[in-house]
Image: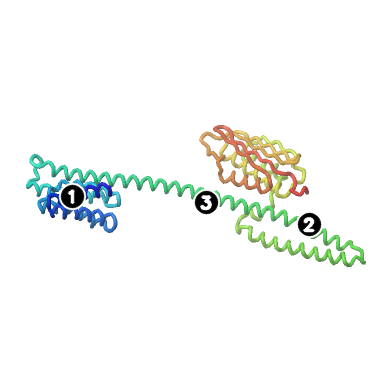
Amino acid sequence: MLVVLALATGVEAAIAIVQRNPGGLLAAAVIAAGVVVGYRLQPYVGLALVAASPLVAAAVGWLPIHNWSMACFAVLLLTLRGLPGLVSGLVAGAASLAAVGWYAGTLSVNDNPEASIAAAAVLACAATGSAIRGQRQYLAELEQRTRDAIATRQAAMDRSVAEERVRIARDLHDSVGHKIAVVSMHLGAAEVHLPPDAGAAAADLVAARAGVQSVLRETQEILRVLRVAGDAASVAPTPDHGQIPDLVDSLRSAGLEVDARLSGLERELAPTTSAAAHRITQEALTNAEKHGTGPVSLRVDASGDQVSIEVVNLRRAGGQDTAGGGHGVVGMRERAESAGGRLEVRSDETVFSVRAWLPAAEEDGQ
């Protein structure tokens, strides 16, 4: 628009110079000033100058066809920049109509059709600019809503990950605190069983026991920070793989049909693996109850070097697809990774499956 208006203004000024008509130069200067002021400074002042340009041309006896033609492009530009299309079209259209009628001496459609053509052209350009601006605003709003939806989903996912990591830290803390307490008891027993002449060893045991008790106190302080006030789950015992049969029984009593095959649950597992096995099984069965239909197949095998968990069920028609990273899936994946294992989730139109593999022992082999 700016290039077209600059060329048109230059052509009109050149014609006025060739014809030695100062009025043509004045009309060209007025519309040029209107475009510059409207584009950079005050849109309404610019609109007033653009509308005045054909009137100035008619007043000085200069053919206004150049000026109302340029007014069309100027109005289109100003409406794209934010001026209301109705106001711009009516003001500039009325001015163009009056200018052409003034110059010709009549507004009759039969004798002077150019007047109505000028007004209609300005109105059409104003409507076009307003429509394009509205479409741009609509697309920008859609893009902003999309960005907001993505940011909201990401924030919810981050919050879910943070909450699950806090629960993991609480569970891990409970198991570690228990182990530290056991170590402190053994150190106390060793101190009691030492012979009377083992003074140096007794002093070392006393120092070791004091250090362990200090660690225990510090972990208890950490536990108070990690626990959420009023959260009943935060004060419950740390879940372990041995509670999986009770978990299955509770879901069966709630009406969920579970085909469970459990093996190796009587053995002792690493605390992190034990808690992760329980939590993954719990969340997978909960997802099956919410989004699935029919019986659920559960397989848990803790008899080898790895603990394998598999939960498979049919998806309910029209049910939510949680394979793409729902909060439950995020929590299960965090649990598996915290124990050094991995999680695999698969979903199609009919079947949803969760499979997890966790190390049975700590990394140091204990």
Q: CA distance from mark 1 to mark 3?
A: 62 Å
Q: Quadrant of residue 301?
A: top right
Between 258 and 215, the residue placed more toward the observer is: 215
Say whether residue 112 is visible: yes
The nearer-to-camera label among 3 and 2 is: 3
The secondary structure type at the circle numbered 3 is helix
Between 215 and 36, the residue placed more toward the observer is: 36
Dot 3 and dot 2 residues touching (CB under 8 Å): no
Residue linked to disc 3:
155
- Amino acid type indicated by mark 3: Ala
Q: Is residue 320 left or right of residue 355?
A: left
- Amino acid type indicated by mark 2: Val
Question: Which label was assigned to residue 351?
Answer: none
Residue linked to disc 1:
14
Q: CA distance from mark 1 to mark 2?
A: 100 Å
In the rendered structure, which disc, 3 or 2, sits on the residue that comes first in sequence?
3
Between 46 and 285, the residue placed more toward the observer is: 46
Question: Which label was assigned to residue 182?
Answer: 2
Query: How far across and how far down the image is residue 70, in percent?
Result: 21, 48
Query: How far across and how far down the image is residue 260, in percent?
Result: 68, 36
Q: CA distance from mark 3 to mark 2?
A: 41 Å
Query: How far across and how far down the image is residue 42, in percent?
Result: 26, 58
Does 25 sit above or below residue 324? below
Q: Is residue 141 left or right of residue 243?
A: left
Q: Residues within 10 Å of mark 3 (few under 14, many from 20)?
A: few
The nearer-to-camera label among 1 and 2 is: 1
In the rendered structure, which disc, 1 or 2, sits on the residue that comes first in sequence?
1
- Amino acid type indicated by mark 1: Ala
Dot 1 and dot 3 residues touching (CB under 8 Å): no
